[in-house]
Image (spheres, rainbow, N blue to C red):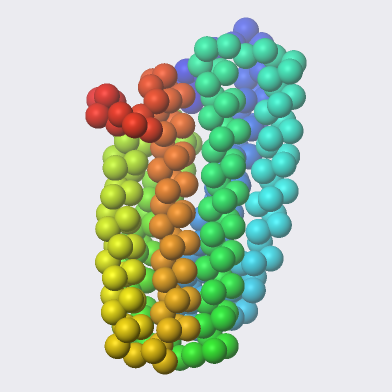
Amino acid sequence: MNEFNKHTSRKFNEELESVRNSVLKMGGLVEEMLTQALHGFFQGDSQVCTNVIMMDDQVNDLELEIDDECRRILATRAPAAIDLRLIMAIIKTITDIERMGDEAEKIARLSINLLESTEINKADHLEIQTMGELVQTMTKKSLDAFARFDSELALATFRSDEMVDSQYESLSRSSITHMMEDPRSITKRLNIMWIARALERIGDHSKNICEYVIYTEKGQDIRHAEEQVG
């Protein structure tokens, strides 16, 4: 973050650092929501899942606070160049983090539905476990890349989304096969597919955060041309 701490105004430096720390706090909450939502699914703990649902309000409140502060900085400081890219990246990042929180909440709600309506077995756990671990790692690395504005880590994490997509496609195919073979499993399989879809969406939002990090540091938009980043 040293490249963002070269202003003549110490107050401006402090404002940028405060906003950045608030984003990291928001990201940490969402990481915890995802971890606990998956824990609730694997352990069959509906209370843990309920706690995750309640945490979403904190994430929403932080998004509003950070957005207000960013808009105040834009109005009063009129940032340019890299500072402007930073503020715009933060505004976009908190939107993605908030949506990640929504998806973690969705996983918690779906897990409660599964626990109330059907029995989950080890095979069901294994399908979600691999994908869940990939997405947790991707989420952590995207937030680490934001914390350090590390474009190399951001690019590696951006590219790892392909593995998440592959896992999601594989799980979807196996779920459809299960439903065709055993219509009684349709409700359970649909809930598991929706959990997998929520994980896939969290991976997409993590990928977006990596895009913002690279754009802020290098001024390059890699949404359609990641090969340009070296």
**Relative horizontal placement of residue 30, taking residue 63 as reference (left or right):** left
Asked if residue 151 can be seen in this view, the reply is no
Query: How many marks do you count on the picture?
Result: 0
- Which of the 4 image quarters holds residue 184? bottom left
Q: Classify residue 185 as left or right of residue 102.
A: left
Please state which of residues 95 and 31 is positioned toward the viewer in this rendering.
95
Of 138 and 147, nearer the camera is 138
Residue 68 location (% of width, % of height): 74, 33
Residue 8 screen position, x and y as percent: 62, 7
Decide: is 212 above or below 115.
above
The residue positioned 60% from the left and 49% from the top of the image is: 98
Image x and y of residue 75, in percent: 73, 18
**Considering only vertical position in the picture, is 63 above or below 133?**
above
For residue 107, say whether it is visible.
Answer: yes
Is 36 positioned to the left or the right of 224 in the image?
A: right
- Residue at 40%, 43% in the rendered image: 207
Against 140, residue 32 (above or below) is below
Q: Residue at x 54, y 74 (%)?
A: 110
Location of the C terminus by quadrant is top left
**Location of residue 168 in the rendering, given as x and y in whole percent from the top left corner:** 33, 62
Residue at horizontal 59%, vertical 64%? 105
